[in-house]
Image (cartoon, rainbow, N blue to C red):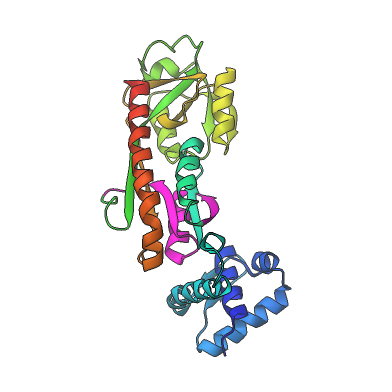
Amino acid sequence: MIKRAHIRQFLAVVDAGSFTQAAQQIRVTQPALSTGVAELERLVGAQLFIRNRRKIRLTEAGGRFLPIARELERAFRAADGFGRDETATAPLLRIGAIRSAPGEFLQRIVAEFARSFSIEIVEGSDSDLRTALASGRIQIALVPLKAGEGEGEALALYEEPLVMLVPQDHPLASRGEVSPEELAPETMIARRSCEFLDATSRFFTRHGVRPRFSLRSDSDDRCIRMVAAGIGITTAPLSLAGEDTVALRVTGYDFRRELGLLFASDWSGLPDIARRLEAPLKAIDAIARDWQRARVAMIA
C-alpha cells in the first residue's frame, strides 16, 4: 500500500534534484530515503528515477506519476487541516523568479499571492525555472516571455528596454542617448544574471568596445549600487535603475524583455486554486500596468 511517506519522499527527491539534499530536507537518512523510493517503485510497478552521479531525472513513468503525487500530497494537507481556519491551511505556492526580476515588483506581486497561499520562492535562470515548472517543482514562474507566450497558461506583465546605467554625476548622464563607441573608455560592471549577457558582449565587441571590469557579480542590487558608487557602468533592464543612477539609451542596443507569469496548467486549473488565483491576478494586472507607466516615464 502506498503511504504518505512514500509520496513525501518521492516529491522531496523531485524538488531537491538529489537524494542527499532530499534526505536533509525531510530529515531522514539517505539509505532510508532510497529504500522508501525503491518501495514506491515496486508498488507502482515502474522505475520513477534515472539515477547517476551527476543528476537525478524522472523517467517517463515518473513524469506521469508526478501530478498524481502532487494531488495526493494536496489531499493529505487538506485532510490534516480539515476543520481548522482556512487561513491556517492555505495551499503551498512555489514561485520561481529570475534573479534579475526587480525586487520591488517581485515584493508587490508576491504580497498579493500571499493573501491566498503559503509562499515559497525559488530563484534560478529562465531555463532552470521553465524546467522546474514543467516537472512540477514550482507552480508559477516569473520569467521573460518568449514570442507567442502571454496567452493561455501565461500572463504578460510589462515590457521594458535594456539601457546603460551610469552614476548621476557621470559626464554622459545628461545625454539621453550615446553611441557604443563613446563608451569605449569606460570601466564596466558585469551583471552575471543578465539574460542578454552574451549578446551584450558581442554587441560591444562589434563596436570595438573591450572594457575593463571593476565587478562581476550575480547580485543585481550590488551591481547597481556600485554603479551609483561610481566604480563602473552597466547594462540592465530599465526597471533596475536606482535613484542614484541615470538610464541612457545606447544607439543600436535594442534589446527588450517582457516579463510575465507562467502557470503549471495541471495546478492552476484545479477549482480551489483557480478560485484563489482570481483576486491576486486581478490586483497583479493593475500593479503591472502602473509599473509599466512608471518605467516609460523614466526614459521618455
On the image, which quarter does residue 8 sit in?
bottom right
Position in image of residue 210 (x %, y %):
48, 25
188 part of magenta stretch: no
Identified at 41% across, 58% down, the residue is: 276
121 part of magenta stretch: yes
Identified at 32% across, 22% down, the residue is: 251
- Which residue occupies the foreground of this view, 204 or 164? 164
Position in image of residue 26 (x %, y %):
67, 68
Q: Is residue 132 above or below residue 204?
A: below
Q: Is residue 253 visible?
A: no
Residues in magenta?
A: 118-147
- Which residue occupies the foreground of this view, 293 or 132? 293
Position in image of residue 4 (x %, y %):
59, 79
In this picture, residue 140 sits left or right of residue 85 = left
The quarter of the image holding the N terminus is bottom right
In this picture, residue 134 sits left or right of residue 150 = right
The quarter of the image holding the C terminus is top left
Identified at 52% across, 70% down, the residue is: 57
Identified at 53% across, 32% down, the residue is: 190
Q: Is residue 18 visible?
A: yes
